[in-house]
Image: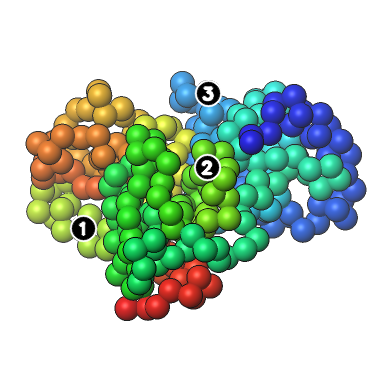
């Protein structure tokens, strides 16, 4: 269950007094997280700073850049590094703790919540129908659930079934393969299936580079923007897209838009739409020539490692 806010506060106060030696192993991940937050935090935006901080932390976990058990910066250190109020940093950590994303441990500090099961294989890993193992590809939207299932089925001789976190009910028997974005939520929703849960990292599909170049040249787009529902996530995602696209796309921007308030891109704009926004657009909007879905895929090395550990036969 998620760590309660009261418990998190109490433990963090004890953790804040930990020696430098006990926190040494968390140094790299802490320093990295501070750098990422400094790069994408925007104090001029109306979105609360604590919400931006929490969103960026979730994004970095989901992209596999920090991992379960990695340390996060102490509150005072984080607040000073970002130039924000101590209570703003604490509010961000409390929101993450309430969602089960992080936990505060006595003498070691705040870490990414340790939700990965210790066992790789359980009887549920085999399909009840016999033959190929069944893998339930769990995501928060249909677009990514379908793509995750396709990635798995393309690499291994398994029965891959897309499944939504909400709306589908309890998943059938099989390995529950989710992304790092939703590891804690999967454990909270299906605590009796903890030993069936496996977590894999995602990455932006490199094919996006060709898609953006082709669309930009064909449509004469003068600027490129990333559209997401949350500002912190949008800015973190935009930074990743900018890195992937490379030279010529330094001016790429982040925009926040809810699917219910959708507006077509400006004439000179190429809009890159995050999956959870794309998933709720109607077909007419998706066909807009200046719209491109941001494609994600399971990281190939992580997928191979998981499949080998579970004994799946490669295609």
Spatial distance from mark 1 to mark 2, Cα to Cα?
38 Å
Q: Residues within 10 Å of mark 2 (few under 14, many from 20)?
A: some
- Residue at 79 percent across and 34 percent down: it is 12
Front residue (pair 91, 306): 306
Residue displayed at 70% across by 46% down: 111
Determine the secondary structure under disc 3: loop
**Pointer 3: what residue?**
48
In the shown orientation, is residue 196 left or right of residue 231?
Answer: right
What's the residue at 41%, 32% (across, down)?
A: 230
Q: Residue at x 70, y 26 (%)?
A: 5
Q: Which residue is mark 2?
A: 190
The secondary element bearing badge 2 is classed as loop
Q: Which disc is residue 211 wearing?
A: 1
Q: Where residue 278 sits: x, y (%)?
A: 25, 40
* First-in-chain label (3 vs 2): 3
Query: Which label is found at residue 262?
Result: none
Report, in whole angstroms, how far the alpha carbon at label 1 lies from the one at label 3.
34 Å
Disc 1 + disc 3, Cβ < 8 Å: no
Residue 223 position within the rendered picture, expressed as x and y whole percent measured from the top left = 24, 43
Work out how far the residue at label 3 is from the one at label 2, CA to CA, in angstroms.
Answer: 31 Å
């Amino acid at each position: 269950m998620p760590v309660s806010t009261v418990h998190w506060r109490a433990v963090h106060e004890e953790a804040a007094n930990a020696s430098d030696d006990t926190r040494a192993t968390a140094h790299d991940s802490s320093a990295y997280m501070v750098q990422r937050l400094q790069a994408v935090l925007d104090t001029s935006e109306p979105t609360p700073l604590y919400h931006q901080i929490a969103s960026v932390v979730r994004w970095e976990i989901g992209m596999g850049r920090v991992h379960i058990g990695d340390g996060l910066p102490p509150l005072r250190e984080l607040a000073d590094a970002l130039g924000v109020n101590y209570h703003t940093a604490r509010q961000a950590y409390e929101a993450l703790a309430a969602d089960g994303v992080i936990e505060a441990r006595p003498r070691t500090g705040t870490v990414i919540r340790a939700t990965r099961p210790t066992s790789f294989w359980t009887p549920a890993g085999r399909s009840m129908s016999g033959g190929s193992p069944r893998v339930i590809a769990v995501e928060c939207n249909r677009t990514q659930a379908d793509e995750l299932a396709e990635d798995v089925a393309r690499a291994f001789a398994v029965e891959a079934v897309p499944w939504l976190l909400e709306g589908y009910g309890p998943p059938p028997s099989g390995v529950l393969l989710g992304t790092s974005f939703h590891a804690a939520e999967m454990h909270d929703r299906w605590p009796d299936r903890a030993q069936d849960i496996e977590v894999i990292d995602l990455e932006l599909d490199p094919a996006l580079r060709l898609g953006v170049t082709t669309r930009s040249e064909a449509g004469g787009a003068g600027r490129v923007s990333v559209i997401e529902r949350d500002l912190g996530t949008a800015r973190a995602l935009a930074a990743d897209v900018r890195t992937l696209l490379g030279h010529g796309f330094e001016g790429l921007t982040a925009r926040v838009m809810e699917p219910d308030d959708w507006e077509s891109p400006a004439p000179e704009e190429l809009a890159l739409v995050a999956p959870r926004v794309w998933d709720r657009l109607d077909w007419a909007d998706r066909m807009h020539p200046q719209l491109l879905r941001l494609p994600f895929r399971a990281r190939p090395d992580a997928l191979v490692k998981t499949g080998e550990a579970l004994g799946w036969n490669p295609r």
